[in-house]
Every structure is written in structure tokens, then in C-alpha cells.
Amino acid sequence: MMQFNEMGLDPRILKGIQEMGFEQPSPIQEQFIPLFLKTPTDIVGLAQTGTGKTAAFGLPMLQVIDPKKRVPQALIISPTRELCVQIAREISDYAKYLPDISIVPIYGGADIGAQLTALRKGVHIIAATPGRLHDMIRKNKVDLSQVTILVLDEADEMLNMGFQEDVDAILEKTPKTKNTLLFSATMPKEIAAIAKNYMTNPIEIAVGKKGSGAENVEHIYHMVHAKDRYSALKRVMDFVPDIYGIVFCRTRAETNEIASQLIQDGYSAEALHGDLSQAQRDYVMDKFRTKGVQMLIATDVAARGIDVNDLTHIINYNLPDDIENYTHRSGRTGRAGKSGISISIIHMKEQGRIRMIEKGIGKKFLRMPVPTGKVICEKQLMFLIDKLETVNINEEEIAPFLPAVNAKLESLSKEDLIKHFVSLEFNRFIEYYGNTPDLNAPDTHERGGRDSRDGRDSRDGRESRDGRRGSSEGLTQFRLNVGLSQGLIPKDIITFVIDATGSRNVEIGKIELFKTHALVEIDSQAANAFLKNSRGMNFRGSFFDAEVNSPGRDGGDRGGDRGGDIRGRFDRGFRKPEGGGEFKRRDRKKRF
């Protein structure tokens, strides 16, 4: 492996990174730095967050900056304030022994006057978020005409957050002769378009397989019934007493709800979502970075750009809608050569989506049982004993108190003293988990699938020996009075169920479509809400009528049934709908 002192870096830069504890370059640094120093060119770097990208572009950037010219010569664009500030801070640290180099972060949510003052004094490197920088460009407050190096960091996340127009406008204001360095974890078509339109014969450097997850991350899933998801989350956290990580939720409302429940239940947690003001967001992030809180409960959008070291776990309270988001989530742990764990809590119908993610990231998931109460109690006890064994004893400070303590405890034997101490901390876990049930849901794949002699699907008791149809365990089957003849598709039914129950987490089982009607299984606990709220809605002019389906009633119109094909595709994994048909109540209209 090439060392930093073999790359041609300025001795002053080497001194700075040595003081920061850099010993060996990461793979992206080893490939990128000597290449750019030898022949500055356009480069596309495909690498996950936490792989050392900032040093990869920051170190050679410092070397080619002319400190005598106090104009912006390098521009780094990143998606979020947190990442922008972090990049500026890191490059300033690398430049510790280059005192003439000036670096300024430009981002929204901060005093624009102070940022403009810094620009007027003269700056060599700008680290910026797209929105604030574009605003300054429109007001003619920043001159990018002498930029020689442009860095687009976390480019895929920038586009996912809707900064396409801002990025295009910024790039148009930079010289065509600059070197463009684009870093991205994935390579969607929008990123490829930027490379084509704004880069000249770029060299591609890929660390690991494109779109793959971090190498040091172990991928695990627990399968439970949908109603047990929160209980499973608490058990996962209790099983790892020193856990430090992020729980990803699908919506802002769910993020708030889960964080509030955890705090109420005595856990160290905070919520991070788009409704927070910048000051609130800063407070939460500072608290999390300093480990004043163990778990951050966040949405994908709110967590983009967060770069916190030493996370032990990522927990997917809901699976993300696409593989790229899963890659971003799991890539926030297992950084800098350390190991990490990504845990997904899924319900019984999401195994197909796990298989899709496995294929996309090129890694296998390990199915693990949700820890039982007994196992958690044992783990917590050993954690307590380890803390007791390694606690730092300040003999001088505690000496004055020992005589009184000894007198108070002299009636207790060694064994009794141990029992009392352990029980003091441990009783709450024993009381809570004493008679708790097993949360693990049965594996539908392990239970057989198409194993009957006539080839019919006999899982979950869906078809009994006398040929009658029944519902899966924990699910109620409903009959809807609209079907294929009205243009109904599975996505429309999912949307209808979500709207009627008011929950995006309701468990949805088998869906079957017929000419004139449809059958859908949903979580039995949501059955009453579904029946109550579904009345009075219509689909493309036909009023919905949902009723609990009686065993043996299959409608009799099999001739036009496409249910088998649709169900087969549906059970292998699906996204919650963003489009779909139109449902409306008699007094209002709602489009999905």
C-alpha cells in the first residue's frame, strides 16, 4: 500500500495529517491523490460515505491553491449544512501549517451577513450548500469566475433532495476549464447526465462494487407481526446497552411518535425531521455527536448529510422505498475500518423486499430472532457487571465516606451485597420482561409455500382441505365490490387500505383481483377502522363497498381472474404507492 509520504504531498500538509492521526490512506485516497497531483483531470469517485473522500479531494486541493490570489479557486458543493460545515472544518485542519489558506462555509440557516463579510475579505476555498450559494449568485454576491477545482460531494443525495436546478445554475457560473470532481455513492442516470454535460473525459474511480453497501457492515433482519414492531425495537435497543445509532422511519409523524414513545419509556432518544427549525436541528445534532443521546430517530431526508463517527447500529424501523436509500442508511455505520450492524425490523410480507435489497447490494441478510426477555436480562446483567469491574476508583475522594458506608452495610454478607447491588439496577428489566411473549413471526418461506400435491399454495392456511378460502393468521380478508373491469390494480388497493386505516404501516397480506371484485387481507387489528372509514369512498365512479369475506366465497368469476399473476409479483416485494387511481368521498376528493 502506498503511504501518504509517497504521494508527492507538501511536507506541511503531511505534518498536519500526521498530527490528526492519519496513518495509512484509505482505498479512495490511495487511488485519487497521486492521480490528481500527477495530472489534474476530471474524476468521478464512486464511494460510500465514511470512506475518506474529504481527504481524497481536500489534500491535493490544498496543494494546488495559490495563496497569493485571494479569490475563490476551489468550490465544494454538498447537500446539507452539517456536511458543509464538516468539510470546511476538516480541510482547515489539514491546512494547519498552511496559514495563508482561507476556507469559508456558505450555508442556509446562518447569518448571511457574516458569510458575505468573509467573502469580501478574500477566500481561497468555498464549501457551500446549493440553495444558499445559488441565492448569492443571483444577488451577485459571489464571483466564481476563477474557480479551478469544483467538487460535487454526495452528488446523488443532492439530486434526491431536489437541488438539480440549483446545481445546474451554479455550474453554469464556473469556468469551462476547471477540473470537476464528482463523488457519489451511487450512479443514477441524473449523475451520469452531470458527468456527460459538465465533465471532460472523466476518469472513474470506484471503491467496492457500484451501489454496494459498506464492507464492514453486517446486515440482519428480525421478522415480527406489524403490531409488534415497536416492541421489537425496544428489545433490540435493550439487547445492546451501549448502542449508538440511528433509527430510520418513513414519515415525520412516525419519527415524532417513535421518539416520544422511547423517551417516555426511559430511552435516550431524540427526533430529527424536516419540521425542526435550524436551531432545533443544531441542538439535536450537537447532543447526538457528543453522545448526549444514544439514538437519533430520523427520516431519510432529515438524515442526509449527517456524518457522525463510531455509530454501532443502523435500525430500519421501516424498509426504505428503494435500494439506494438502504445503501445510504447502512453506510452510516462501519466506517473507517470499524464494524457496524444494520438491522431491519420487517413484517411477514416483506421478505421479498429483503431479497431484492440483497441482490442490489450484493450481500446476504442474516435472519435473527428478536431477543427474548431472558436473553436481554442476561445481557444487561453482564453489561452492569462489566461496568462494575472496570469503574475508575478515586481512592482519595471516596475515603471520607467509606467508614459510614461500611457501617451501613456490615450486616450484609458478600453474597447478599452482590444480590442487593445487582437487583437495584436490574429489577426493572426482570419486571418488564418477566412474562413477555415471543415476538418472532413464523417464516412463511420455511413453512412450505407450494408444497401440496396439486401445486396450490397452502401457506398460512389460506386454502383448507375442503377448498374454502381462509385468511392468514392475524389477518382479516375483505371483499371489495370493484375489480379488473373498473381498472383496479394492487397499488390502488394498497392506497385505499392506507387511506381508510390512516396508517402506512398496516400489514397487508394477499391481494386477488377478479372481474367484478377483489379480495385483500389486512391486519385484523385494523379491520374495524377499515370498515368504518372505507364507506362512502369511490373509485373512478364506483362506490366502494368493503365487507368481511366469508370462507368459501370466491366470487365465481374466475374466467377473468388475473389474481394469480398479480399476487405472485406482489408477494415478492412492493413499494407503497405514490401514484395510482383516484379515490373520493361523497363530499371531498383525494388523489393519490
Image (cartoon, rainbow, N blue to C red):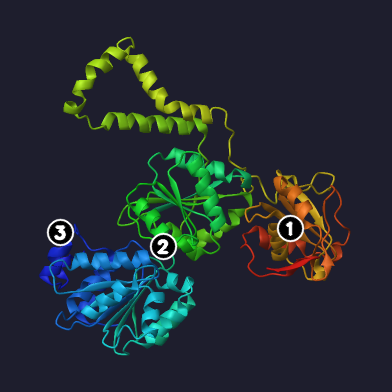
Contact, mark 1 vs mark 3 (Cβ under 8 Å): no
**Which numbered disc, 1 or 2, marks the residue closer to the eye?**
2
| Residue that carries the numbered disc 1 in the rendered image | 511
In the rendered image, residue 64, in percent from the top left (x then y), is placed at 19, 79
CB under 8 Å between discs 3 and 2: no
User: Which residue occupies the extreme left position in the image?
Assistant: 11
Q: Where is residue 579 shown, x and y percent of the image?
A: 66, 70
The kind of residue on which mark 1 rests is Ile
Residue 308 visible, this angle: yes
372 w.r.t. 192: above or below = above
Report the mark closest to the observer, 3 or 2: 2
In the picture of the structure, the residue carrying the numbered disc 3 is 19
The answer to whether 323 appears left or right of 48 in the picture is: right
Badge 3 element: helix
Q: Earlier in the sequence, mark 3 or mark 2?
A: 3
How far is disc 1 from disc 3 in space, using C-alphas? Answer: 61 Å
Q: Nearer the viewer, mark 1 or mark 3?
A: 3
Residue of label 2 = 278
Alpha-carbon distance for marks 3 and 2?
A: 33 Å
Vertical comparison of 406 with 460: above or below? above
